[in-house]
Image (cartoon, helix red, strand yellow):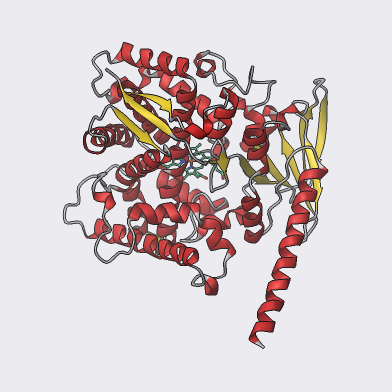
Amino acid sequence: MVQTAVLIIFSFGLLYVVQLYLAFRRGTTQGTAPSLVVHSPRGTIFLAYLGSPQADLIYSRGNTRITDLPAGMYIPQYVSPPYARKPAILIQFTEQATIKEVVSYRARFPKPVKQYGALSFFGKNIVASEGDEWKRYRKVTAPSFSERNNQLVWNETCRIMMDMFDNVWQWKDEIVLDNCIDITLPIALFVIGVAGFGRRISWTDDQKVPPGHRIAFKDALHIVSTEIFVKLAVPKWAMGLTQRFRNVQTAFDELRVYMLEMIEARKNSEKKEERYDLFSSLLDANEEESDGEAKLSDDELLGNIYIFLVAGHETTAHTLCYAFGLLALYQDEQETLYQHIKSIIPDGRTPTYEEMNLFTRSMAVLYETLRLYPPAISIPKVAAEDTRLTVSNSAGEKKVVPVPRGCDIVISTPALHYNPRYWEDPYVFRPERFLEKDWPRDAFLPFSAGARACIGRRFFEIEGIAILTMLVSKYKIEVKEEPQFAMENLKQRRERLLANMPGITLTPVRVPLVFKKRA
Ligand code: HEM
C-alpha cells in the first residue's frame, strides 16, 4: 500500500519535472535569446540546475552569443510554462538607454519580490523587499556605509592579508591552490565578519568547531549559500532522507544559532564601545522603538544579518577568483599591474587607506573582471503599470515598445557588458579601457543602478583594491600546470579556468592557480 502511494507520488513528480523541462526548452529555443521566467521557487531550482542559459551561452560554449543580436534589439518572449499561473511575458533589453530608464524609475519598475523567496529563509530583508518595507531597511543600514566604516574595511582587509601571508602561507616560495576560491571565500568572509559584524576570525581559529556546534561558522554559511536550491526543492519532511539533505539542514540550523549568538554576544557585551559597523545599526534599530514597535523585528534582524553576510562575501569572493584567474592567463596585464603598484609602494610595504585612490589600475582590473563576469547575470524587474519603453534597432531607428502591467523584465548584465555597440572587442580582457576618461558608464551595470543599486559597492571596491594590490605586490600568479591539460590552447585554458556554474551568483567551477613569491 505504502509502496504504491510512493510510486504514484514519484510518477507525478517525474511528470512534473518532464513538463518543466519541456517548457524550459521551449522557452529557450523559441526566441534567439535565453528566457528565464520564474514563477515559483520550484521553477527557480529547476532552471538553476540546468544551468543559467545566459552564462552557458556567453561563457561556456562560446558559439551562440546573445550579443550577436543586433544591438539594442528587444526580445519579447511569450512563454507559458505549466507552472505559471497566467501567461507570462518577459522582455529583455540590451540597450543602455532603455535599461537606464528601467532602473531609474523604481515605482514604475519595482522588483518582483516573489522571485526573491529563496533569500528570505531567515526573515524579510533589504534585498528581498519593496516599497515602504524596503525604505525602512535601507534607512536603517545606509548610515553604516560611512567614511569611518570605509577605513575599517581597508585596515581590516590589510590585516587579514598579512595574517594569511604570515600564518597560513608562511612566506613560502610557492603556494599551489587546486581552487582559488579556497582563499578568496575565507578572505571575503573574514572582511564582512569584522567590518560588518565586529566578528574577528583568524585563519587558524576558523579551522575549529566551537563547543556546542556541529560545524564551523564559515562552513555553515558556505553550505547555506551553495546548497540553497536543495533547501528550496526538498520539502521539510524529506530533509532527513539523504546525507546531503541532512548536511544542508544542519548548515541552516547552525547558521541560525551562530547568528543568534552574534546578536546575544553584542547585546551583552560589557564594553559598549563606539563601533562603526553594520551590526550596530541593525541592533540599534532592533532596540529602538517607533510608534511603540521595534524599527526592526527579531525576524527582520536575522533576515538582514543573513543577507548582508551572503551579499557581502560571495560576490566579492567570486569576483576576486575571476580576477586572479584572468591575471594568471594574461601575464602581460599582471606585469603592468605589478609595475603600477610598485611605482606607488616601491618597498612593498602595506599601503595606507589614504593611498587607496592611487591604485587606479587595481580598480581597473576589478572593473574589467566585473564587466566580463558580473556576479548578478540578471536583474529582474516588473512593470507596475501599463507603460512604454523606447528602444532603437541596429539601424538606429527608434521604436516604442508597449509594456503591459505585470510584464516581467530582465536586465541581462552580460548582454550589456558584451555589447559591441558600447565596448570595443568585448571579449578581450583589457583593464585599460576603464582608465580612459569617457568609458561607457551606463553600459556597466554589475552593481545595478538607481535606488536599488548595491549598497555595498564602495565596501567591495575598498576591500577588492586592498586584496588585489597586496597579493600582486607580493606574489606572482600563474595557472597551475596539470598534465591532463598540457595540450590546450589559450582559448581552451580560459574557458576551463573561468567556467562557471549556477549559484546565488555566478560561481567559478574551479580555478587552479600557483602563487610564486616575488623576489
Ligand atoms: C562584487 C561585489 C558586488 C556586486 C557585483 C554586487 C551586486 C549587487 C547587485 C547587482 C545588486 C542589486 C540586486 C537586485 O536588484 O536584486 C546588489 C544589491 C545589494 N548589495 Fe551588492 N554587490 C556586491 C557587493 C556587496 C557587498 C560587499 C555588500 C555588503 C557589504 C552588498 C550588499 C548589497 C545589498 C544589501 C543589496 C540590496 C540593496 C537594496 O536593494 O537596497 N553587496 N548588489
Query: What is the total number of numbered labels drawn onto the structure image?
Result: 0
Residue nearest the viewer, comparing 98 with 104: 98
Q: In this rendering, would 308 be left or right of 420?
A: left
Q: Nearer the viewer, residue 277 or 232?
A: 232
Q: Can residue 6 be seen?
A: yes
> Image quadrant for the N terminus?
bottom right
Which residue is rendered at x = 31% and y = 29% of the image? 174
Task: Judge from the rendering whether residue 493 lies leftward or rightward of residue 314; answer left or right.
Answer: right
Q: Residue at x 39, y 63 (%)?
A: 298
- Quarter holding the C terminus is top left
Q: Furthest residue to the left? A: 270
Q: Pinpoint residue 51: horizontal percent, then vertical percent.
A: 63, 47
User: Percent from the top left, x then y, of residue 275?
Assistant: 26, 44
Left or right of 155? Residue 14 is right
Measuring from the top left, give residue 41's x and y in whole percent: 62, 59
Residue 6: image quadrant is bottom right
At x 54%, y 60%, the residue is 230
Expressed as whole percent of the image width and height from the top left, the position of residue 356 reads 34, 22
| Residue at image coords 20%, 56% | 269
On screen, residue 480 versus residue 345, left or right, reads right
Q: Is residue 293 above or below residue 397?
A: below
Q: Is any part of residue 403 visible from this angle?
A: no
